[in-house]
Amino acid sequence: MNESHVQAQAQQGGQQHPISLYLKVWLLLFVLSTLSYMVDYFQLQGMLRWSLILIFMFLKAGFILAIFMHVSWERIALKLVLFLPPLAILLLIVLMAIEGDYTFVNRLLSFLSS
Amino acid sequence: MMKENIQASEDKNEDNWQGVVRDWSADKQTFDMPWGKLMMWIFLLSDTFIFSIFLTGYMNVRMSAMDSWPNASEVFALTIAGHHIPLVLIAIMTFVLITSSGTMAMAVNYAYRGDKKRTVYFMAATALLGALFVGMQAFEWTKLIVDEGIRPWGNPMGAAQFGAAFFMITGFHGMHVSAGVIYLAVVARKVARGDYENKGYHIVEITGLYWHFVDLVWVFIFAFFYLW
């Protein structure tokens, strides 16, 4: 980034980062996607499959948010707006997981008793 | 005077909890960014809720289903040149979408550098990759509906809820991609015409936020729908 770019950025107030950074993240997302595809291709099962899928998912989501969507360079005030409300979603997921198990067990019981 | 200026610039760069308090309580605009960008973030937050609720509903019906859930790896397998490859179409769609995210990031970068021509090229490339993604999705849907007999109310491979969840989630995502392609095409045309010459190129970053979000959602759909 040379001096005129810095000035252009100051005038526009926009996000300006070296292109090599985007290319690196792009490559990284490619590698992570390939790895998560490999998890399925080699039919890994159980906890290993789940932990790998979730790790690759969160890494990809994190890189897209942080670099491509520039969240890393935003102020905390915006990060709070973006990341606090979704905590309610976590609660919903937990509740619906409990509910799903409950429904399943009830169906099973009614199936067995009939 | 000099000292005050230095103080002011330090306040602006201060990004910690005191900075949060100051952003909210000081006599100024809380979010130091163009209105359009903040509104896009709020919209994307609302979209996060919609997609999360779809995926959570899908989790709920899958956990409570009595019939066995179809094996996504096999449902989305293709036979290419005599080789049976599980989930290959979805893998290619994922790579296409990630690549389009990459070209979009480049478009934003060139927009802020004031390189109009490259911005338009990269936005057009992004839109084309998005259209390619939608095309592959149309192929995927056709194959599932016509060849495999999957319907929103049932399918020959197991749990009836599979069809409902599949068409709901991927359909809503596909609609987002299609809308994104149109959005990109419109903004790229306006950039090419020079409409933002004086206003600045924030619009490209705002369009980019939408596009990266579509890619972001696909990351979760890929993990929970196709790999689970």
Image: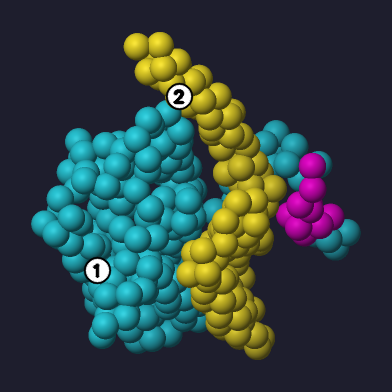
Question: CA gap, disc 1 to disc 2?
Answer: 35 Å
Residue kind at label 2, given as amino acid type: Phe
Can the viewer see residue A113? yes
Q: Residue furthest right?
A: B3
Mark 2 crowdedness (10 Å alpha carbons): few <14, some 14-19, many ≥20? some
Residue closest to the eye, A47 or B13: A47
Which element carries disc 1, helix, strand or loop? Answer: helix
Task: Provide the secondary structure element on which disc 2 rests.
Answer: helix
* Residue B64 is a magenta residue: no
| Image position of B63 with respect to A48: above or below | above
User: Which one is in front, B38 or B90?
Assistant: B90
In screen coordinates, is B65 left or right of B20? left
Q: Residue at x 18, y 55 (%)?
A: B148
Task: Write the residue at 43% across / 41% down.
Answer: B55
Of all chains in the rendering, the one displayed in yellow is A
Q: Which residue is mark 2?
A: A104
Can you say whether A15 is above or below B81 in the image? Answer: above
Q: Nearer the viewer, residue A9 or A1?
A: A1
**x 27%, y 75%: residue:** B79
Q: Position of residue A31 (x, y in %)?
A: 56, 76
Q: Which residue is mark 1?
A: B136
Give above or below for B168 relative to B84: above
- Residue A86 position, x and y percent, is 56, 37
Number of other residues with Cα within 10 Å of mark 1, as a class: few under 14, some 14 to 19, many 20 or more: some
Q: Which residues are magenta?
A: B7-17
